[in-house]
């Protein structure tokens, strides 16, 4: 598995979770990294992304609540999720992107937020 996502779980509304996506040095250095999510019966949507240089962008629905970051020493990308809402419930996926190859997806991690 090239991208190893972890950190999902069951929390109550208003609580926090931190997702982690660990990968190899080669993938981490040469790729932009992103978190996507897919709720049951829905399409997979971008949540947040961070470029190799550290520029970030977010879906409108998570701005101000979620923070994406990269740890260069650990080849890991994080998604800090605060003030979670029931509508954040989904399977969260990590993805690595570069202009020269197809994206690499990790296995998903389930996040469930109860009201």
Image (tube, rainbow, N blue to C red):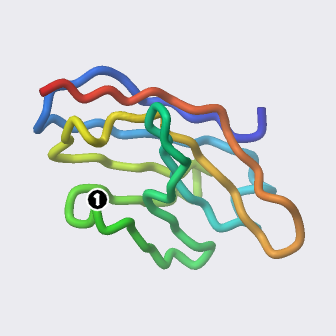
The residue most toward the top is 10
Query: Measured along the vertical axis of the image, is residue 83 above or below residue 45?
Result: above
Q: From the image, which quarter does the C terminus lie in? A: top left
Q: From the image, which quarter does the N terminus lie in? A: top right
Q: Position of residue 81 (x, y in %)?
A: 29, 46
Q: Tell which of 75 and 91 is nearer to you.
A: 91
Q: Is residue 14 left or right of residue 69?
A: left
Which residue is at 54% across, 47% downward? 43
Q: Position of residue 87 (x, y in %)?
A: 26, 41
| Residue under pointer 1 | 62
Query: Measured along the vertical axis of the image, is residue 50 above or below residue 35?
Result: below
Which residue is at 43% across, 39% downward? 19
Q: Tell which of 39 and 57 is nearer to you.
A: 39
Kindly indicate the quadrant of the structure image that contains residue 101. bottom right
The residue most toward the front is 41
Q: Tell which of 1 and 90 is nearer to you.
A: 90
Q: Position of residue 103 (x, y in %)?
A: 77, 57
Which residue is at 45% across, 73% downward? 56
Q: Position of residue 93 (x, y in %)?
A: 56, 42
Q: Is residue 61 left or right of residue 37?
A: left
Query: Measured along the vertical axis of the image, is residue 55 above or below residue 50?
Result: below
Kindly indicate the quadrant of the structure image that contains residue 33. bottom right
Crowd tier of the residue under label 1, counting other residues whose Cα lies within 10 Å: few below 14, some 14–19, many 20 or above? some
Which residue is at 39% across, 68% downward? 58
Q: Tell me the element at label 1.
A: helix
Query: Measured along the vertical axis of the image, is residue 71 above or below residue 100?
Result: above
């Amino acid at each position: 598995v090239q991208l190893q996502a972890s950190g999902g779980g069951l929390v109550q509304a208003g609580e926090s979770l931190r997702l982690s996506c660990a990968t190899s040095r080669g993938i981490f250095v040469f790729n932009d990294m992103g978190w996507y999510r897919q709720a049951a019966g829905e399409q997979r949507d971008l949540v947040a992304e961070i470029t190799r240089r550290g520029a970030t962008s977010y879906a409108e629905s998570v701005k101000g609540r979620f923070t994406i970051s990269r740890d260069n020493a650990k080849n890991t990308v994080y998604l800090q999720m605060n003030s979670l809402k029931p509508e954040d419930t989904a399977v969260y996926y990590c993805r690595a992107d570069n202009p020269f190859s197809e994206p690499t997806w990790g296995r998903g991690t389930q996040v469930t937020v109860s009201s």
